[in-house]
Every structure is written in C-alpha cells, then in structure tokens.
Amino acid sequence: MSHNQLTESGRLHHFLSIEGLKRPLLTEMMDRAEQFSSISHQQVKKVPLLRGKTIVNLFFENSTRTRTTFELAAKRLSADVISLNINTSSASKGESLRDTLHNLEAMHSDMFVVRHNQSGAAEFIAQHVAPHVSVINAGDGCHAHPTQAMLDMFTIRRHKQHFPDLRVAIIGDILHSRVARSQIQALATLGVGEIRVIAPKTLLPTDCKTLGVHVYHDMEAGLKDVDVVITLRLQLERMQGALLPSAREYFQCYGLTERKLSLAKPDAIVMHPGPINRGVEIASAVADGPQSVILEQVTHGIAVRMAIMSMTLGSQAEFHEVTP
Amino acid sequence: MNLHIKNGRVIDPASQLDAQLDIFIRDGKIVAMSSHLDGFTADQTIDATGLIVCPGLVDLNARLREPGQEHTATIESETLAAVAGGITSLCVPPDTDPVIDTPAVVELIEDRAKKSGRAMVYTIGALTQKLQGELLTEMAALKMAGCIGVSNGLSPIKNSLILRRAMEYAATLDLTLFINAADPWLQSNGCVHEGAISTRLGLTGISETTETIAVARDLLLIELTGVRAHFHNISCGKTILLIKDAQNKGLAVTADVSAHHLHLSEHDIGNYDTLSHVMPPLRSIRDREQLQQGLRDGIISAICSHHQPLDNDAKLGPFAETTPGISGLETLLTLTMKLVDDEEITLHQAIASLTSHPADILGIDAGQLKIGAQADICIFNPNIYNECQPNKFVSAGKNSPFSGWLFNNKVSHTVFNGKLVFEQDKIRSIIV
C-alpha cells in the first residue's frame, strides 16, 4: 500500500515497507547487496557512490546494531552521516517529531533513516519531507522493519537459493513485531512455499491469517520439516504479566532448543534479528551452534543497507562505477 | 417579522406530511402551512421551488470546544457551522473544560449560545464530578439549570456500583442517561478496529467486545435501575442485537449512530489516514452494513454528527499520537441524504432520524413542523451536484475524511426561531 515509496518510473524513492513492492525490485536489492558485500573484504572499504550526500540517522528509539550498520553502510558509500538519538518523552511526543523534522530539513539533508516507536511514523515523515529527500524506515512501532527483512532474505538466499521450495517458520511475538510483519511480506513476495508462525494466542494479531501465514500454537508441529527457523526477540516488558506468565514457561513452550530444532530439516538454518535473549527464545547451544546464521545476518546488514541506500538515493548513478 | 417560505416540498416526518406547501411564519412561530394565508404580508420571502423544506435538524452530540479549547473552536464559530449544516438544535456533551458539572458552566454555555443566537444549544450534564467516575454531581441543580440529560462523556465509569448508583439517582430525577459505551480495559491504548487493518498496520486494535461488553453491562444495570438511557455512537453490528433485545423487553433504551460510521469502514484508514482516526473506531464493512440495517429496522433511531472540531496540528503525526475526531456538523445532512441516494434508507427515514427522532429522545418540542411551534426549519436542495471541500467548512475544524466526496444535496437556507440565520451563496453551481 505504500505506493508513495516508488517514483513514477517504479524506482525506489523511499523505503518504508515491503508491502506493495514487486519481486524483481527485491531481487535487484539482493543482487546489488551481493556485489557490495565483496567491498567489505577489500583493503579500502569505500565506494564514491554517494559522495557529497548528507544522510541523517534519526533514531527516536534506542538501537545499537541497526544504527551502526546504517552508519557503516553510509560511510562505505562515501556519504556524510550524522546520527541523532532523540528521546521521545511522552510529554513531547507528536510535536517533537514534526519540529525536529523541519529543523533538520533546513540543514539540506538528502536522506533520513528513521526509527520511531509509533507505527506509521516513517510514512508520516515521508509525507512531510521535501520531494527530493528520501526516507528509509529503520523500524516504526509494530508496523515494519523492511531493511531487516531484506537482510534476512539475503541471508536465506545465500544458504537456500530457491525461495518457492522453502518452508519458513517464524516463532515468537508476532503481535508486536515489525520484523515479523516485514519478513512475512518479503517471504510472500519472493514466493516462499509455506510461511508458518508459531506463538501462543496472546502474541498473535487477530486475523493473523490475513497475512497469508499458517498459524501453529504447538512448536513441535510447527517446526516439522522447515528449512528456515526465525526466532524473534521477546521484549522484556512482555515476559511477565497478562501476555505470558514467565520467561521460564515461554522458554519451555516456545524456546528453540537443539531437541526441537531436530524436528526441522537437517540442513535448516536458524536466524534471529537480535539482540538475543539466551535461554528465553533461544538456547545458547542453538544460537552458537552450526545451524545458526545469526552473526552472518549482522554482517549482511551492511551490504543490504548499502544496496538500499544506493537504490533510493543514487538511482541516477550508474551502478557499474562501483563494481570492483 | 413575517417570513414566507413558498413553493417548497414540505416534509414533516412526525405528522407524515409530504406536500407542496407554503409556510408562513410570524414572530418566530409557524402560523400556517397552506397554499396561501389571507392578510399575511411577508417581510422576507424564500423561494423554495425545487427545494425540500423540513424541520431544523436536531443533533444529539456535538462538541463546540467552549469553554476550555477556544483556540480550537467556539460556540460562535460552531453554531454558525451548525446552521450551515441545517442544524438548529444540538447537544453539548459534558467533557468541556471545566466539565459541565456545575450550574455555572451550564449558564456560561447557554449565555454564549444565546448571544450567538443561531441555534438552540442544550447541555448534557456530567454524571460524576469532573467525569472521574467517583462522586455523583448535583444532578438536581444541573437539571434546574437546564441540562437535558446526564452523561459521563468519553470516560466510562469503571466501577459498576458507582454506575448503578448514578443511574438510580438520574432515574429519580427523570434525567436521560447518555452513554458512550466502551470497556476501558479492553480499549486500553487502542486506536483502530481490531482486525485485518490493525494487523497490517501494526496499530493497537480495539475489539468489538470493547463496545459489546460495556453495552451488555450497562443494559443490565438499566434494567435494574429503570433509568431512561440513550447509547451514543454505536459502532458494532453485535451491539444492535443487544439493544434490540432490551427494546423488546420494554426498556427505555434508544441509540444513535454517527453519519461517518454509516459511510466509512476500517479500510478507509488506508495508509495511516489520520483524518479517519475516530473513537469509537471505524469498524468492518459488515458492521457498517449492520448499522445501516439497524437504522432501517428502527433499532437505531437517530443519526448524529458527533462533531469534534480539531486544529490541523491535532491530525499531524504518527496515527496513534493524533487526536481522534471528525468535524461533522456540515456533512450530517449530506451524508444522511447520500444514504437515500444509495437507496439504503427512504427520504422519510433519513429526515426523521435527523429531526423528530432525536427530538423525541431529548423530549424537546422541536424537530417537527406544526402550527404554533417555533419556526426552526432547514431548507435544502436535493438535486445539486457538489464536492465536499473541508477547507471551506464554516466550522473552525476542517478535519473531515470526506474531502473530494461528491454529494447530490446541499443546505440552502436555515431558519432558527423564525429568523433566516443561514443562506447558501446565491450563485448556485451546476444544477443537475
């Protein structure tokens, strides 16, 4: 539905959500990331693609990894980067967002990378920036985290290649997860054969099936014969109370252990968007085990974000300039 | 002052009148409805040829923002907007600032309304002090001061014992209780209907049970206490079944629906359209159809604006952080008449649900055309093609999701207490 993220010619202007994007665009993103990922292994890890561009990382919500990989990605593309952490106190909510935006616009930035705790915040910012400014959604509320989803797709492709043959299970707090929503949309767009979600009812949105997924409450049934297992981070505040009785019981029912993982295909890969709660959603032995690709995901985050930034901001630049 | 409205199609649902008639008004009162009146010299004549002449509309719920939020809107600005929408009587809920929980606030609002002199403004008094749901207000004093009923506004009373006592007390004083039903725990911090759209957009949903559980509890207490009650702005199809049951049991229970809930659904939120952020939330398409059916069946008897004027800033921000509400005075008639064009309800049902039915709920002598009654009259063109342009609203609140909607009707004149208080631009655009 985020049709306004595309230019008239169908190129990416903003990157707000996977929803509405076509498969060739996602494939192009991953192809580009593939080429960028080789740069990380060079002596000089920079390409001049975005030289002279100013990118502002606007983080209204804490993040270390996402912000750092966005910074690195921008720097490797030779852009100038500023990162701002803005605390959103409840007293200054809506206003601070608008005012901050206008102030930053006055500084002639070319791109905003935005993380905000409200669903729709990136969309809102994209509607209110000057037409030449691009907005990348680095996570908005419970809505979307499209760059994370794309780096996950990239990681899956590195290991599995043909999406339509795959069975993918996503385990955990789907209700509050922007990562899960974007992953589901990306997996569906790439034609994945079967997408499963595994969670107790308290952590599933109503009408979950409208997302095009198969719903499992029993983890063992849900993991059977899957190729990719994605565990989601369980936020601390959800671990006890009305959604779940305790972290311990959650681990018992929905924690990924070696025993449960053995129900998946023998070559199944294990993913997690991080940061990990060891012993809550995933056992250490699995997180550090041979099937885990969790650290790879972090590495791929840089190349994928470089690809997305160059596609939105440098769509006019010729791509062959950068290939080594 | 003699006013002559000639050649109009006069429709008065209360008396089943639908005829080509002239209306003669003297000193604020209707003196005759006939083809001519001997010895009547008009000071002013309105040519209503091709127009529908009906009672001035009665709106059960409109926020005027005064006192407390005069920077958003005032009684002056909003009563002008009301008559621009053909509304000549309206009710103000108690959630002003200060709350309508003392006679002083009632008097202040009535004073300002009288000065404005365009529409009759009724106040609904607070059921509990400061709407906090703990201590009863001095309801007898509020009634004496002119309150037409009592309500706890948008702050549901959590404690069922206090609600029971408040109902008993209101019943003692023969005051109608107006209820916006929502279970506060289920509603929590939700901002949209819980369903496919809340799932897709990652917004916290408000389940149908938020409304139905509250209505069910309230109905049981209404039965227990015998209070006369009216449910404002119901949004779910299942609520209609509960109210139907209560009405069948003989309880004095009525209900209204907002004009926007009859036309919009959760899907109109599209991609975080904050103008469609409203409370209760826009529900599913099926709910919308059931609300229309409830109206046809007479279980819902009134259509209201649930007018909430807001300044532009209130709608600028991420969806959940924006203020819910729609500026509805100037689209109440047009949206209701659109249901007639769409053949959802008849012309008479439409006009009755805006005039005699809400007047009956309030127990006021308005909403009908009869000899001797105060001349509150709405005249509208049922055949004029026009586009909704909220930026041209008379109301200080331009917050309407209906921008660009095409309507086939428009208010042309509004008469309040025998005076012409609103007249549409003389230049009529393309008449179809």
Image (cartoon, coloured by chain):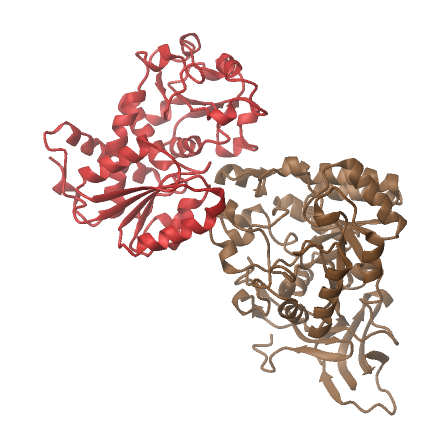
Chain colours: A red, B brown
Is residue B152 in view? Answer: no
Identify which residue, B299 or A139, lies in the foreground.
A139
- Quadrant in the picture for residue B3: bottom right
In this picture, is B173 found above or below B222? below
Identify which residue, B168 or A139, lies in the foreground.
B168
- Quadrant in the picture for residue B335: bottom right
Q: Where is residue B333 in the image (x, y as percent from the top left)?
A: 68, 65
**Which quadrant of the figure contains the N terminus of chain B?**
bottom right
Direction from residue B31 to residue B376 in the image, left or right: left
- Quadrant in the picture for residue B308: bottom right
Query: Who's the residue at 82% across and 37% down the image?
Result: B220
Query: Who's the residue at 23% across and 33% down the image?
Result: A303
Q: Where is residue A300 in the image (x, y as percent from the top left)?
A: 26, 28
Direction from residue B59 to residue B139 in the image, left or right: right
Is residue B97 in view? Answer: yes
Query: Who's the residue at 40% across and 45% down the image?
Result: A122
**Which quadrant of the figure contains the C terminus of chain B?**
bottom right
Query: Who's the residue at 70% across and 44% down the image?
Result: B132
Direction from residue B3 to residue A255 in the image, left or right: left
Direction from residue B246 to residue B329 in the image, left or right: left
Q: Where is residue A195 in the image (x, y as percent from the top left)?
A: 44, 26
Q: Position of residue B274 (x, y in %)?
A: 51, 51
